[in-house]
Amino acid sequence: MKFMVIVKATKESEAGGLPDPQQMAEMGKFNEELVKAGVLLAAEGLQASSKGARVRFSGGERTVIDGPFAETKELIAGFWLWQVRSLEEAIEWVKRSPFHGETEVEIRQVYELEDFAQVMSPDHLERRKTLESQSWRQQ
């Protein structure tokens, strides 16, 4: 099972503040543990929403909204992508993460291609498998 582990933004992360060297070292050690356990597939931090944009879709119209975005509690500061056996295992790993102070982490299961089998034609499913074998999932 794959899970996206979403680290919510804080006032500090939205202000563009970087973690101190000790926090970086602790997170580096934690990420090494994830790698050694065969759990970590990807991990990235995100810059403040002031450096981003949103695109709103309404029918055929596209509206670009420049950051920053007001609701910090709804923003993402970073993420991990993990391969684990269960939600419970993902929760146990999150509990071990070296966050200090006020931080919220959300854990969401990632859909697998097989989850869509009932709404995709066999031909479409095969094309998608071929595409995945040639693209981002194999990097």
Image (cartoon, rainbow, N blue to C red):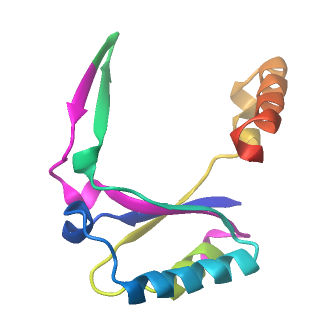
In percent of the image, x 39 and y 85: which residue is there? Answer: 21
Above or below, 77 against 133 in this view is below
Q: Which range of residues does the magenta coloring cover?
A: 63-88
Q: Nearer the viewer, residue 78 or 128?
A: 78
Q: Is residue 99 among what the camera can see? A: no
127 sits to left or right of 94:
right
Task: Tell me, yes or no, whether the highlighted magenta stretch contains residue 138.
Answer: no
Q: Is residue 122 among what the camera can see? A: yes
Rendering coords of residue 44 (x, y %): 50, 60
Task: Tell me, yes or no, whether the highlighted magenta stretch contains residue 85.
Answer: yes
Quadrant in which the N terminus is drawn: bottom right
Rendering coords of residue 25 (x, y %): 49, 86
In percent of the image, x 83 and y 18: which residue is there? Answer: 123
Rendering coords of residue 114 (x, y %): 77, 41
Q: Nearer the viewer, residue 116 or 51?
A: 51
Rendering coords of residue 29 (x, y %): 58, 86
| Quarter of the figure with residue 92 | bottom right
In percent of the image, x 27 and y 80: which residue is there? Answer: 102
Above or below, 116 against 11 in this view is above
